[in-house]
Image (cartoon, grey):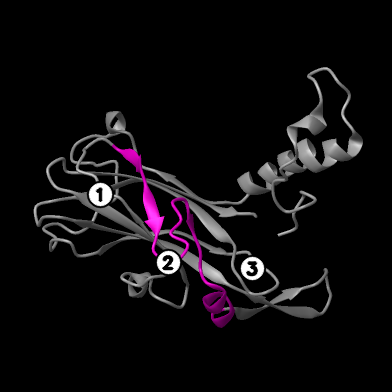
Amino acid sequence: MAKSSMFGGLVSLDTALYGAGDDPMDAVVMRDGPLNGLLHLADEYAQIRANWVGVEAAKLTGNQVGYRGIVASPSADEWYRIGEVARWPIQVRAGGTPYKVRLRIGGASDGTHTATFAAVITPTNWSGASWLGQSEDNVFITAGTASTSPAWLTGTSQGSAASGTLAALSARSGRAYQVPTSTLDDLGGNPAVANQLTVLLELFGKTSNTAGEARLHAVHASEYVG
């Protein structure tokens, strides 16, 4: 992705450089601070890869539910696949490291038992379930919830980064699962081959009891530029 910000991230400048509220601002400070920051935020918010929300209860009829769940009568504390939420060619840095993905997961339970959710960023030729239980940062597991009220859940990536907001494939995985993709460099031109890494965002759920439910209400994912 071509960044529009000059530095590919936010720049922290000493507040003294900005002067008083009505003072004119130096052109370089303006470029490196506010303008670069605004362009970086534009880069960030332009890379949304998933933005799924369930149907609100007031709009449901009959036996309809406004969430996605796991199988009925699940085994306690066993992961079940809820489904694929997104699939896209993730941006990869020159060294082979894929961009990180900022995640938000909204969920609830049946109100009696604890539900937990896991999000996995995985190459398309690799099962998301195979990553569960591994200490990798492309696996993001939420805190448990026993409430019937949908809420954004806190969570942690399972690798060394232990991030509370970001999931990321390792550079090793990013390089290993890239595949050559043919495209045209211009209309009527010759085919050009570029390496591409296509990933899935898969969601899983589990409950603390065979009578429990894991109710997925919302998923938001965006590539993190920085």
Q: Which residues are magenta?
A: 150-177
Q: Quadrant of residue 38?
A: top right
Mark 1 / mark 3, whichever is N-terminal? 3
Which comes before the other along the chain, label 2 or label 3?
3
Quick one: label 2, few (<14), some, or many (20+) residues within 10 Å?
some
Indicate the position of residue 18 as horizontal and vertical percent values.
Answer: 80, 29
How many neighbours does mark 3 have within 10 angstroms: few (below 14), some (14-19), or many (20 or more)?
some
Q: Secondary structure at mark 1?
A: loop
**Residue 56 image offset from top left, x and y in percent:** 32, 34
Q: Which residue is mark 2?
A: 159
Q: Position of residue 195 (x, y in %)?
A: 66, 77
Position of residue 93 relative to residue 104, above or below, is: below
Q: Quadrant of the N terminus?
A: bottom right
- Residue on which the image places disc 1: 144
- Amino acid, disc 2: Gly
In the rendered image, which residue does mark 3 sit on?
92
Q: CA distance from mark 1 to mark 3?
A: 32 Å
Vertical placement of 225 versus 170: above or below? above
Q: Residue at x 73, y 45 (%)?
A: 11
Q: Residue furthest top?
A: 22
What element does badge 2 sit on?
loop
- 107 sits left or right of 8 in the view: left
| Distance CA(mark 2)–CA(mark 1) | 19 Å
Left or right: where does residue 90 sit relative to residue 81?
right
Q: Secondary structure at mark 3?
A: loop
